[in-house]
Amino acid sequence: MNPNPYKRCKCREDGRELGAKCPRLRRANGSWNPNHGTYYGKAEVPSGPDGNRVYLRCGGFANEADLIAFYDAAGRLLDIPDAGPDGHEARMEILEMIRAAHRKQAPMPDYGELHRKFRAGQPLQSMTFGEYWTQFVERHRRLKDIRKSTLSSYVSHHDVHFGEVLDSVRLDRLFAPSVEAVFTRIDEKNEVLAAAQASDDPEVRASVRGRRPTGPVTKQRVLATIRTVLSSAQREHLVSFNAAKLVKLDGGQKAKGVVWTRVRQEAFTAAYQQRLEAERNAPVQPKKQLEAFRVWLATPRPSPVMVWTPVQLGAFLDHAAEDRLYALYHLIAFRGLRRGEACGVRWVDLDLDEGVLAVAKQLTMVDQGVEEGAPKTESSEGVVALDKGTLAALRVHRKRQLEERLAWRDGWQDTGRIFTREDGAELRPDWVSEHFERLVFAAGLPPIRLHDLRHGAATLSLAAGNDMTTTSRMLRHSNLHITSDLYTTVLPDLAHAAAEAAVSLVPRAVVVGGPSETPGLPSVSQLADHRPTDSTDPEKPQVNA
């Protein structure tokens, strides 16, 4: 391109910029003055189908050589597109990229990369990950081709974990180290959280109470979300490869259930009492009123997944027998429904005469609201056989609900759900979980999550002699591996029985130590018969039935 070089300056006369008319731009002999002004150029770009003339005007160059080199590079880039309407459109896009680079004093677009993108039919100007993320979410919200709960989890992963790291990165510059930086940032946050939880300042501890570090399983889910987004960008030819597929994280196996034995329960209770006493005696009290339940809930447990013994489950069910949601907790504890499935079941799904319940809907929390949807997976939809005790509890619950319906009259909301609020409105799954935890606390039992009742149902099924296939069908898993990997927690008494059975196979003439129990330790039968005592904590909240 011939830039037709000329010079301009910023000199003013009578308040007006002289520009190219400044007399100081040239010497007496007519040549350019090298000590005044800067070089500018103007070159014509091939016109489009409409015939309108287009020019590239750029300036501010210190010397003519720099100006010519710039226009030579620009001309080479503008020659990439072919002739024709499509070529002209691409040429105009390249022209804007050249102008933008000049304005920002940034390097010119890379010729090889631009040439490759044009030949491959890819967009010439790469957007940032954040710009593409916005389009990705808006498109799927419009098409509704992803579950709301799934898309909500994607948004949560972006907002909490990877948005701050990736949003400003250009898609064509997003490599494996960029994705790895997400998990470096997560580890940094985990360290800050651990330091705050161990702080001597009660206000600092209170600020992170209830928060948990991001574990290996969540990291794997975050990586899967990034991988999904980049796979979509790859299908649209915005990236040539999926950088997230090259990132390897430490294995994040899901936590397996751990049984609340007497020793574990006593250790937890001691830790809880110690934390509660420390909070009460702190020199500076937190702004929020101290609640023993919250301290109990935040006290570390041996494992994220804890399972009650049959005795402990029986103690809970006895305590919750008069609670209006007793049948819901009974159903989860013995038949292993998920929380959302239990909240979503309808009377039309229940056949009390045949003793079966069809799992067809679930309620989930999406953006602080409650959404109805299909069960978690295709295999989750199925029919659950109910035992006589569960059927009896459901009949009592139905009678109670009919009484509530009569009491509310016109104010009753006919949602058709089996489990509702007092006025018939749908339950919030998160409220059901907290209500359960408060019942557990009031019963003086060690804490478990509501979902852990499902783990316990699987354990009870296996302990009762049901095989893995039967238990897997009850839980409606897609394959036996999930059941065997996660839900085969062995209860202490069963483990002892298995150990005794193995030893009894070997004939012995000499029995070292004899058959008596070890002095000072409780017997196996005493462990099995142990029932937890009610908490004597004066601040223990009372849960109304």
Image: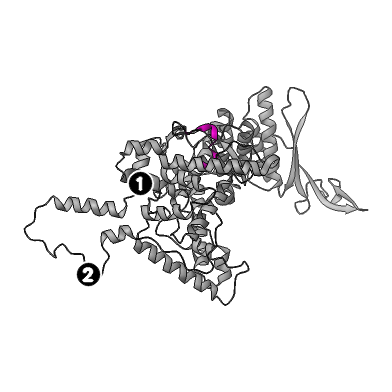
Q: Is residue 246 a member of the stretch shown in magenta?
A: no
Residue 498's label in the rendered image is none
504 with respect to 23 (left or right): left
Q: Residue at x 69, y 35 (%)?
A: 95
Look at the image and give the residue range highlighted in magenta: 342-352
77 with respect to 157 (left or right): right
Q: Is residue 351 a member of the stretch shown in magenta?
A: yes
Query: Residue beneath label 1, please?
Result: 460
Mark 2 Cα-neighbour bin, 10 Å: few <14, some 14–19, many ≥20: few
Dot 2 falls on a residue whose secondary structure is loop
Instruction: Pick whichever, 176 or 200, lies toward us.
Output: 200
In the rendered image, residue 68, in percent from the top left (x then y), is placed at: 68, 41
Q: Amino acid at mark 1?
A: Leu
Instruction: Pick whichever, 233 or 287, lies toward us.
Output: 287
Q: Amino acid at mark 2?
A: Pro
Residue 519's label in the rendered image is 2
